[in-house]
Amino acid sequence: MARQLTLRIFRYDPLDPESKPCFVDYEMEETPRLNLFVALHRIRENQAPDLQFDFVCRAGVCGSCGMMINGRPTLACRTLTAELPELITLAPMPAFKLIGDLSVDTGTWFRGMSERVESWIHTQKEFDPTAEEERMDDETAEKIYELDRCIECGCCVAGCATANIREDFLGATALNRIGRFMIDPRDERSSEDWFELVSTDEGVFGCMGLMGCDDVCPKELPLLDVFAYMRRRMSQVAAGKAKPDAGTSLPVIS
Amino acid sequence: MSKAGKGKEITHPEGELVTSAERAKRQWKLDAISTGTGVFLALFMWGHMFFVSSILTGERGFNWISDLFEHYWLAQPTLVIVTIVFFVHFVTASRKIPAKLAERKRVKKLGDDIAGSEWNFSKEDRKELEKVRPHKETSLWIWQVRSGMIILALGSVHLFVVIADVAQRTFNIGEGVGINATETMERVQGGMWILYAILLYAVEVHAGIGLYRVTVKWGLGAKIPILGSRITRSMAQKMERIVLWFFLIIGFITLLVMAGVIDPPLEFLLPAESGAK
């Protein structure tokens, strides 16, 4: 017999002065292979037409549907109700601005993060559109690709204790982004340039080491490896022994 | 960090002007000191355990070592250094503890939630998931803080007692016998065993978790010399468990000998009468 599910959903519309934050229960019958993406759409179609939540790709690629599912930040589209008990609590991710109900504004946060880490290749070289593209060895390209797999869902930020209590903390995704540019040979920022941003309490040395980011990352990025690599490299800078290093100790995807 | 922002001056919370590079260096230094002192103290504790467990060979073995250390002026400077490092570690490491109760509660709640305790996995799946994502890190961190506080209190008492012992002998105050087995055992049997048992457990837990976290934070991906393989989280976890249990077991056997519950099991190692004082 199919299970009767209760979805306890956080409801609040910050734009409506009448609205008070609360949890509302929605009942539904579980169908085979039901995932939360479909479940939430059913609720919006049949029970709560004003329910706000974000979805785009339904395949764990766009990073829009990150939410707290029974307290754990993860992607709703990749979560089957069969993995959960009959009572499923859904809440918006903390650390981001609430748009309404389950929808949070990760966009503004990630834009700010990109500006803070200046998330683009810094080079003095004049771009020549007719020239052949510069070659990069396979290993470096694969490492960059591995870190570039981040879909900016924000789960690592929501699952990070430090980011939860300190607004100015860069967060795992930003450190991962920095790692990506650190090992990119086209980026001319030196280790000393990175030091000012990374080697602070807002950067990698503010991390308490609770490893929540690594444990909840839906893309299973090697976040802890990136941080360890950064700590070592920043210590070389502090000791005045920084050498150019394209992330030799970072894992390569196989 | 950018060319434009490089070397810009910012106001430090203490009110002085520093460049962002100087500030970064300061924060790196504080983290490095807390890590370095922690590793130093953990390694010291291993050595400490090794020498204290000389009681397993009987009172003579214990006295021979403590006498050697005090006579050749090894114990005195070590005591001073360890006491300083002990408090420096407390000051630098406690920077990571959130100051507000609400923040600490948030850390705990988040840890409980992401542990997936409410997820309805089948037994096999849960086992599989825990293998891939061991979710004990937050509670381990919380226990590291708790054990650290216990060590701060009980360790200070222990340091005071040992400093008093060594100072009495060094400066010829009172009976001036220094660290010796008879007095130590009397102390343990007189009720101090409670303090030492709690302190021992807290130290081993604190040092074990600390070394594990340092390995994960600084060492992941680094190549291990000789073996050539890279350090992984599960490897660090296994090491932590082995080290923790090894020292806990030796520690508690040592404590049982000191409390007079069991006889020194390694007494046969020492020759019958030689070296008796």
Image (cartoon, coloured by chain):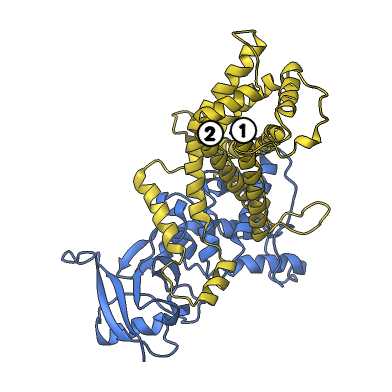
User: Chain B drawn in what color?
Assistant: yellow
Instruction: Write the residue at 54% across / 41% down.
Output: B202
Q: Is residue B229 left or right of residue B149?
A: right
Q: Is residue B231 left or right of residue A11?
A: right
- Residue furthest left in the image: A18
The local crowd at label 1, few if under 14, some if 14 to 19, many if 20 or more residues have their Cα within 10 Å, is many
Q: Are marks 2 and 1 in contact (CB under 8 Å)?
A: yes
Q: Amino acid at mark 1?
A: Met
The answer to whether B198 is drawn above or below residue A14 in the figure is: above
Q: Amino acid at mark 2?
A: Trp
Instruction: Write the residue at 53% across / 76% down.
Output: B125
The answer to whether B140 is drawn above or below residue A88 in the figure is: above
Numbered badge on residue B258: 1
In the image, B72 versus A67, the foreground residue is B72
In the image, B94 versus A56, the foreground residue is B94
In the image, B132 versus B198, the foreground residue is B198
Q: Give residue B210's position: percent from left, percent from top.
A: 59, 45
Instruction: Report in which chain the residue with disc 1 lies.
Output: B
From the image, which quarter does the N terminus of chain A lie in? bottom left
From the image, which quarter does the C terminus of chain A lie in? bottom right
Q: Secondary structure at mark 2?
A: helix
Q: Give residue B147's position: percent from left, percent from top.
A: 50, 41
